[in-house]
Amino acid sequence: MTRIAILVTALATATSAAFAKSSIDALCGPAHVNEVAAADDVTANPDGFNIRSLQTQLSHGDPRILPASGNTFHLCTASAATPDMDRTKALLLMNERRVKYLFVPNECRKGGSIS
């Protein structure tokens, strides 16, 4: 009976990890890599989450913040330059990145902090 419980738990964990990875792949692209620059790049605060490398604060309720399994933040970015900009503005923003999605560990969304 214990073996069955362990097997079910392991299967559920693997399934949720695969689902989280498939969600990241679906939203960020299959060749995407986590763009968190360092272990302390994303920090939780009372207002939401601060991304130090992008000098960006995402407040709670921002639709770009998504729950994730695991214990690490996962950041997807997009170019700040868009096709509808004029040439000069697009060239100025060519190397700038903006937050597309920030996947936040469930325990951090509940008020804890990940170090």
Image: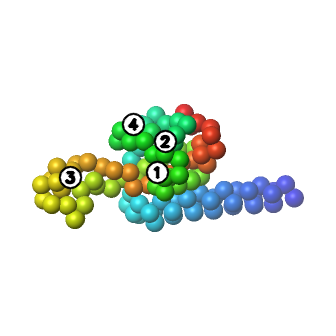
Q: Dot 4: what SS?
A: helix
Q: CA distance from mark 3 to mark 2?
A: 25 Å
Q: Are marks 2 and 1 in contact (CB under 8 Å)?
A: yes
Of labels 3 and 2, earlier in sequence is 2
Going from N to C along the chain, the mark reached first, 2 or 1, is 2
Q: What residue sits right under mark 2 in the picture?
A: 49
For marks 1 and 4 on the same chain, the one whose residue lies earlier in the sequence: 4
Q: Which dot, 2 or 1, sits closer to the camera?
A: 2
Q: Amino acid at mark 3?
A: Met
Label 3, label 4: how many angstroms apart (C-alpha)?
20 Å
- What amino acid does circle 1 point to? Leu
Question: Mark 2 packing: few (<14 Cα in 10 Å), some, or many (20+)?
Answer: many
Note whether residue 53 is visible: no
Q: Give the CA distance from mark 2 to mark 1.
A: 9 Å
Residue visible at 59% across and 52% down in the picture: 69
- For the residues labelled 4 and 2, the Cα–Cα distance comes to 10 Å
* Mark 3 burial class by Cα count in 10 Å: few <14, some 14-19, many 20+: few
Q: Amino acid at mark 2?
A: Phe
Q: Are marks 1 and 4 in contact (CB under 8 Å)?
A: no
The spot of residue 88 in percent (x, y) is: 12, 55
Q: Please name the residue that numbered disc 4 is placed on.
A: 52
Circle 1 is placed at which residue position? 102
Residue drawn at the location 52% of the way across and 59% of the way down: 21
| Residue 115 locus on image (x, y percent) | 54, 33
Q: Position of residue 33 (x, y in %)?
A: 40, 53
The disc label shown at residue 94, or none: 3
Query: How far from the left and from the top, in percent, is residue 22?
Result: 51, 64
Q: Earlier in the sequence, mark 3 or mark 4?
A: 4
User: Cα distance, mark 1 to mark 4?
Assistant: 13 Å
- The number of numbered badges drawn on the structure is 4
